């Protein structure tokens, strides 16, 4: 039996949901609620001492870290493989997975909180409540301290957006080198599923302009993935920030520069 403890909108959770749907795996969806701090409760920390989502439970045993989870699933459910067949191609895919964890995964958090509505629950807290919430977090306390209750310094946002452009550039190189339509070539792999929720999140926040003009191959790659049946299953209603915060004017086709004048000035 497989169970997945996850948030609806978490990009790391979506990575795993995409893999499970693409592989046709049957599983039990255990949806946690971020605003209730379910992931910081004592019972959950026993499953995942990092206090983050997702956590996979396989026959009662937890498997943590989304990049580890998707590779684990690909090993135990081999009929639909999301890993290239040759050692060299597997090495290239794993190198890209390491890049995704190191660069775009942390980068996407900054605009998600700053512009995507996630900061709202902290704005509603007192200073004491915010400090208590930060202290509960085993891994991300410093991130929340840096954000505070009012948002990140401008240099943090600039660095995050630059890292997204860097990511799109890396993806474009792979699409050109391997011939597409996927990052590793003709086969859909974990490389695609690992980065797709991050690029989708940036599109949802109105930052598609970062790659659409410079890297049109990336825009086509995203559209192709979004058209897949498994993608629609993983992205059920409520999975995007534009679903959760409709009053912010987010969503595909929007432009963050129209909502945030400082972004427009920085792009000039």
Image (cartoon, rainbow, N blue to C red):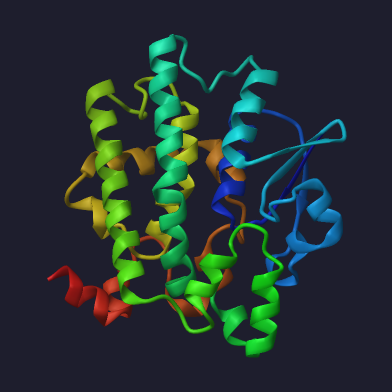
Give 36 or 211, whichever is nearer the viewer: 36
Q: Is residue 22 above or below residue 219?
A: above
| Res 226 visible | no
Residue farthest along the left direction in this orientation: 268
User: Would residue 31 be found to the left or right of residue 59 on screen?
Assistant: left
In the visual, does 90 lie left or right of 9?
A: left
Q: Residue at x 77, y 36 (%)?
A: 27
Quarter holding the C terminus?
A: bottom left
Residue 203, percent from left and from top: 38, 57
**In the image, residue 174 lies at what x, y percent?**
28, 29
The residue at 47%/43% (across/down) is 101
The front one of 195 and 229 is: 195
Quadrant where the N terminus sits is top right
Residue 168, percent across and down? 29, 45
Counting the numbered discs, the total is 0
Which quadrant holds residue 210?
A: bottom left
* Residue pictured at 31% horizontal, 62% vertical: 159
| 113 on left or right of 30 | left
Q: Is residue 261 visible?
A: yes
Which residue is painted at 28% across and 38% down in the image?
170
């Amino acid at each position: 039996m497989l169970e997945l403890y996850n948030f609806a909108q978490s990009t790391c959770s979506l990575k795993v949901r995409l893999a499970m749907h693409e592989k046709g795996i049957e599983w039990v969806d255990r949806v946690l609620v971020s605003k209730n701090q379910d992931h910081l409760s004592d019972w959950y920390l026993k499953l995942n001492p990092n206090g983050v989502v997702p956590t996979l439970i396989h026959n009662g045993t937890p498997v943590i870290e989304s990049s580890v989870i998707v590779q684990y699933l690909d090993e135990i459910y081999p009929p639909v493989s999301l890993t290239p067949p040759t050692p060299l191609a597997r090495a290239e895919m794993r190198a890209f997975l390491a890049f995704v964890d190191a660069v775009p995964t942390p980068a996407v958090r900054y605009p998600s909180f700053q512009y995507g509505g996630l900061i709202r629950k902290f704005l509603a807290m007192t200073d004491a409540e915010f400090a208590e919430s930060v202290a509960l977090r085993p891994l991300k306390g410093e991130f929340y301290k840096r954000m505070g209750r009012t948002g990140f310094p401008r240099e943090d946002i600039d660095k995050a957006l630059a890292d997204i452009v860097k990511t799109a550039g890396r993806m474009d190189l792979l699409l050109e080198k391997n011939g597409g339509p996927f990052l590793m070539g003709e086969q859909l792999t974990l490389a695609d599923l690992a980065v797709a929720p991050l690029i989708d999140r940036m599109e949802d926040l109105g930052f598609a302009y970062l790659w659409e003009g410079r890297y049109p191959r990336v825009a086509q790659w995203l559209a192709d993935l979004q058209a897949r049946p498994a993608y629609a299953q993983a992205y059920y209603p409520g999975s995007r920030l534009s679903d959760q915060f409709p009053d912010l004017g987010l969503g595909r086709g929007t432009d963050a520069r129209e909502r945030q004048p400082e972004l427009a000035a920085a792009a000039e």
